[in-house]
Image (tube, grey):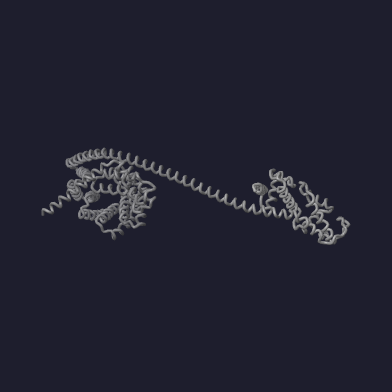
């Protein structure tokens, strides 16, 4: 026995220490609270609610709600949404419905944005209740419907039934019985699954309301009596008083005076015994009205006096509570706004930091890409210059070969037939067709063309063309074109470009002065009017531009001088 007492005493001391610690925590400052994690804030807030310290709980929930951020984990966002729910509940209990509505809307937005399925029906249900208080029944019904659909989709049957009860009762109370019937039938169906006392109580109570609207007062009384019996059996205190009052009102409609008095009296005793002041106040007014209707003004005034006294007491209590709550609410709202602003500033700072980091990485990446590109270009240019050097050597060898042997080769082509007496190319020269040149004539023209290209610089004149070449050979342009095509395997323009570029290479290699002249000057010296045309033809024939050719030529000369 002694050991048991000691054990109880130890438990008592343990509980006292917990409460003391909680009270100390309750006085913790907001800056200190902001150091706690969302999970810690949520758990401590819930603990204060469980031990009936709502003011302290709201401090934790205020910090938690105000600290909501996009960068939070989904679990932490869930804690924030729950905090908004509890803050809304607190203001709803204080009858500050506008603030409650705002907090619940904030929570709903988070729940829908973060897909917190279980919380969405809860918020829609609470917001629907507020909208009915604001006399917005249509909007309230819309919220209830959304809550019902969401709860059904996710299998949240507990909230599904709660919202069904609310929407049915609101529709019945607003005389929308046709619309209410649909949800009433769903409730009846749910009663087959949910057999809890509280649910059966509400089913019976709503059934009574439906039958009352239909004018079936006896059935309504029977249903309400069922609701009362369930409430008494399960000790649902507030529901018992509501059932007494409702049955009395039903008997008033049946004009059953004795039954009205019976239930009003029973309700008076019950509310006084259980300290249900608000229920008692309304019941006293009903008793006063009952005796007034019966002509018993003395009893009516007695109950009216009791009603006034209780109303004054409740009014004073309410005022005191409102003063206390207003100060507390002001502190809560102020701190919530400050915390929310601080959180927003932190988010902006984080975004700025991330932005600057991104810019830094972008610049760094850009620099790396630029450096890599420059290295790649440098490497490619180096390879290209090596290729140009090979081409330069090949072109140099080819040019030397042409200079030494091309003349003999062309002369050899001109001697392909035995030399006969010179033939004048004119109208008296016989040939079978305009497109067929006699071999003797072809050989003679080939020699003349070769002589002009190798022994004269006529082709370096800017106005040198096919007509001039024909005049120099005492022939016509048609013969000249055909001979060039057959002997040189190209047209006149291509042949002219080859010899002009060949001459340009010769000048650049053998006259150092030309390497210091402009491309335009070099182009004009070999018969080009345009440096652009000269550059294009030079590149087509040598594989490189004149400027690169000159550069490589200078490098070669410098290397030769060093050695």
Q: Is residue 78 above or below residue 413?
A: above
Residue 302: x %, y % from top left: 17, 41
Q: Is residue 34 left or right of residue 296?
A: right
Q: Quadrant of the N terminus?
A: bottom left
Q: Is residue 234 above or below residue 309?
A: below
Q: Is residue 316 above or below residue 481?
A: above
Q: Quarter of the image holding residue 30?
A: top left
Relative depth, front residue between 370 and 221: 370
Residue 282: x %, y % from top left: 23, 44
Q: Is residue 441 left or right of residue 277?
A: right
Residue 154: x %, y % from top left: 35, 57
Answer whether residue 128 is visible to the viewer in this image. Answer: no
Relative depth, front residue between 15 and 35: 35
Relative depth, front residue between 485 and 501: 501
Q: Is residue 48 left or right of residue 374?
A: left
Q: Is residue 349 left or right of residue 244?
A: right
């Amino acid at each position: 026995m002694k050991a048991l007492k000691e054990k109880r005493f130890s438990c008592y001391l343990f509980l006292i220490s917990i409460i003391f610690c909680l009270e100390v925590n309750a006085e913790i400052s907001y800056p200190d609270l902001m150091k706690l994690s969302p999970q810690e804030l949520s758990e401590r807030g819930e603990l204060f609610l469980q031990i009936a310290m709502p003011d302290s709980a709201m401090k934790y929930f205020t910090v938690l709600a105000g600290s909501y951020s996009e960068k939070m984990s989904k679990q932490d966002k869930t804690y924030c949404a729950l905090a908004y729910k509890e803050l809304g509940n607190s203001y709803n209990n204080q009858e500050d419905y506008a603030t409650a509505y705002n907090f619940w809307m904030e929570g709903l937005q988070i729940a829908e944005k973060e897909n917190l399925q279980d919380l969405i029906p809860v918020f829609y249900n609470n917001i629907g209740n507020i909208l009915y208080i604001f006399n917005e029944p249509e909007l309230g019904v819309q919220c209830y419907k959304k809550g019902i659909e969401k709860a059904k989709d996710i299998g949240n049957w507990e909230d599904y039934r709660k919202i069904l009860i609310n929407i049915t009762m609101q529709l019945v109370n607003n005389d929308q019985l046709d619309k209410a019937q649909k949800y009433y039938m769903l409730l009846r169906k749910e009663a087959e699954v949910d057999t809890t006392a509280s649910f059966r109580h509400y089913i019976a109570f709503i059934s009574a309301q439906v039958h009352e609207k239909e004018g079936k007062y006896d059935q309504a009384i029977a249903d309400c009596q069922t609701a009362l019996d369930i409430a008494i059996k399960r000790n649902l205190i507030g529901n018992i008083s509501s059932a007494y009052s409702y049955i009395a009102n039903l008997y008033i409609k049946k004009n059953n005076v004795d039954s009205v008095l019976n239930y009003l009296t029973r309700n008076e005793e019950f509310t006084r015994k259980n300290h249900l002041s608000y229920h008692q106040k309304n019941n006293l007014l009903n008793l006063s009205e009952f005796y007034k209707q019966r002509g018993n003004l003395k009893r009516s005034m007695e109950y009216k006096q009791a009603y006034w006294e209780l109303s004054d007491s409740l009014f004073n209590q309410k005022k005191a509570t409102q003063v206390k709550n207003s100060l507390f609410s002001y502190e809560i709202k102020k701190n919530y706004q400050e915390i929310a602003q601080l959180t927003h500033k932190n988010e902006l700072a984080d975004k700025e930091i991330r932005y600057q980091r991104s810019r830094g990485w972008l610049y760094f990446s850009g620099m790396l890409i630029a450096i890599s590109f420059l290295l790649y270009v440098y490497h490619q240019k180096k390879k290209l210059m090596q290729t140009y050097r090979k081409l330069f050597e090949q072109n140099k060898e080819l040019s030397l070969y042409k200079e030494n042997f091309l003349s003999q080769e062309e002369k050899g082509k001109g001697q392909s037939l035995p030399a006969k007496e010179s033939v004048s190319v004119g109208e008296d020269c016989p040939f079978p067709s305009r497109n067929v040149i006699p071999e003797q004539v072809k050989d003679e023209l080939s020699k003349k063309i070769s002589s002009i290209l190798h022994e004269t610089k006529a082709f370096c004149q800017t106005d040198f063309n096919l007509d001039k070449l024909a005049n120099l050979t005492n022939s016509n342009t048609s013969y000249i074109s055909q001979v060039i095509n057959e002997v040189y395997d190209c047209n006149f323009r291509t042949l002219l470009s080859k010899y002009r570029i060949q001459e340009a290479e010769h000048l650049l290699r053998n006259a150092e002065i030309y390497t210091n002249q402009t491309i335009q000057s070099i182009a004009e010296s070999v018969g080009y009017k345009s440096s652009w045309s000269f550059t294009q033809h030079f590149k087509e024939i040598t594989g490189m531009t004149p400027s690169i050719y000159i550069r490589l030529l200078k490098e070669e000369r410098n290397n030769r001088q060093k050695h």
